[in-house]
Image (cartoon, rainbow, N blue to C red):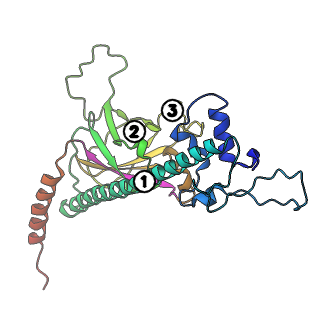
């Protein structure tokens, strides 16, 4: 069989290895492995020859025989041994990638469940706040400057998950020293109405600052729309993100918040772009908060609240 009839992936690797005098690496096969569910025969199949049977000049690649194996090989010639060596390595790489993908799917599902549980926890906090507060009297918030919240979103995991970039998402708020005071004392607490700034971090692709704003004084459902800070942030698409983009906060209490961002501020996986929502909502939980102890406190508070309600006639 003519050596020009080898599959395209073999020609590419032959040039890469023989032509450049180097060993083949597992990742070298990945470019031609697009569908891990396809069979070995499908992956090596080439377009059918359209030349006539009498065309002696035909150089169209021939399809591999389905029974192509070490004992019954359809390719011959000086490069046949090297082809079958690479083919075996390629099949091994397929198996590795399949296992990696299975593990990633399991990891993503577990992470989604974890994020959903955190969302339900914050939702419960919000409901308890609404039930327990006196109408017209919202709880006073502690100082927001210097606080750090871990962010959670099941939607973000579903549409933006990358196993290699899976990291702790957070938002933090920082005090702003007076511009004209070189002797500003950071050991003293800032004034309650002093402006604060901050930034959020999703992964190494997505980190963004937001402009200074006056911190909220009361907990509740009120939305605070904060402009993102222009810092020449460049996305993977090489487009500079507009400094007019907004993030929306709700400060449910000292330990909880929600943060909503537009889809332009997250990195959506290519396969999910058409399906992803226009906005992504995150819940924030103050770093270091003991959720188990807080849940027990809520249970007692809810029981007290329910017992204080008048009995239905």
Distance in Å between CA atoms under marks 1 and 2? 30 Å
Mark with earlier residue (2, 3):
2
Task: Determine the image quadrant of residue 197.
Answer: top left
Q: Is residue 268 visible?
A: no
Mark with earlier residue (1, 3):
1
Taking depth in this image into account, of 164 and 278 the one nearest to the observer is: 164
Q: Residue furthest top?
A: 182
Q: Is residue 181 left or right of residue 56?
A: left
Give percent across and percent down for residue 289.
19, 46
Residue at point 41%, 46% (across, down): 163
Q: So how many labels did they put on this image? A: 3
SS state under label 3: loop
Distance in Å between CA atoms under marks 1 and 3? 42 Å
Q: Nearer the viewer, mark 1 or mark 3?
A: 1
- Seen in the picture, residue 189 relative to 48 is either above or below; the reply is above
- Which corner quadrant holds the C terminus? bottom left
Please tell me how crowded label 3 is: few (under 14), some (14-19), or many (20+) other residues with Cα within 10 Å.
some
Q: Is residue 101 visible?
A: yes
Residue 234 falls inside the magenta stretch: no
Residue occupied by mark 2: 201
Residue 280 falls inside the magenta stretch: yes
The label on residue 99 is: 1
Segment colored magenta: 276-287
Residue at point 27%, 44% (across, down): 217
Residue occupied by mark 3: 230
Q: Residue furthest bottom?
A: 313
């Amino acid at each position: 069989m003519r050596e020009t009839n080898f599959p395209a992936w073999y020609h590419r690797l032959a040039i890469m290895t023989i032509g450049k005098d180097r060993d083949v690496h597992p990742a070298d096969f990945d470019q031609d492995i697009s569908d891990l569910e396809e069979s070995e025969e499908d992956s090596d199949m080439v377009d059918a020859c359209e030349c006539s049977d009498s065309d002696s000049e035909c150089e169209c690649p021939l399809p591999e025989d389905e029974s192509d194996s070490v004992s019954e090989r359809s390719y011959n010639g000086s490069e046949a041994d090297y082809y079958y060596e690479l083919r075996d390595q390629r099949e091994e790489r397929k198996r590795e990638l399949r296992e990696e993908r299975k593990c990633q799917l399991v990891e993503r599902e577990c992470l989604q469940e974890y994020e959903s549980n955190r969302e339900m926890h914050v939702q419960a906090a919000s409901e308890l706040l609404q039930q327990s507060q006196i109408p017209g009297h919202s709880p006073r918030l502690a100082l927001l400057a210097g606080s750090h919240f871990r962010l959670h979103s099941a939607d973000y995991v579903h549409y933006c998950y990358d196993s290699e970039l899976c990291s702790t998402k957070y938002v933090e708020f920082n005090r702003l020293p007076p511009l004209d005071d070189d002797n500003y004392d950071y050991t003293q607490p800032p004034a309650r109405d002093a402006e604060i700034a901050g930034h959020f971090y999703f992964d190494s692709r997505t980190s963004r600052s937001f402009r200074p704003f006056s911190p909220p004084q009361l907990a509740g459902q009120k939305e605070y729309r904060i402009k993102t800070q222009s810092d020449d942030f460049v996305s993977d698409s090489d487009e500079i993100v507009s400094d007019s983009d907004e993030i929306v906060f709700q400060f449910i209490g000292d330990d909880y918040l929600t943060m909503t961002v537009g889809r332009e501020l997250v990195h959506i996986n290519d396969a999910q772009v058409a399906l992803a929502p226009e906005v992504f909502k995150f819940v924030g939980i103050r770093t270091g908060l003991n959720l188990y102890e807080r849940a027990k406190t809520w249970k007692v508070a809810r029981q007290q609240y329910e017992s204080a309600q008048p009995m239905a006639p």
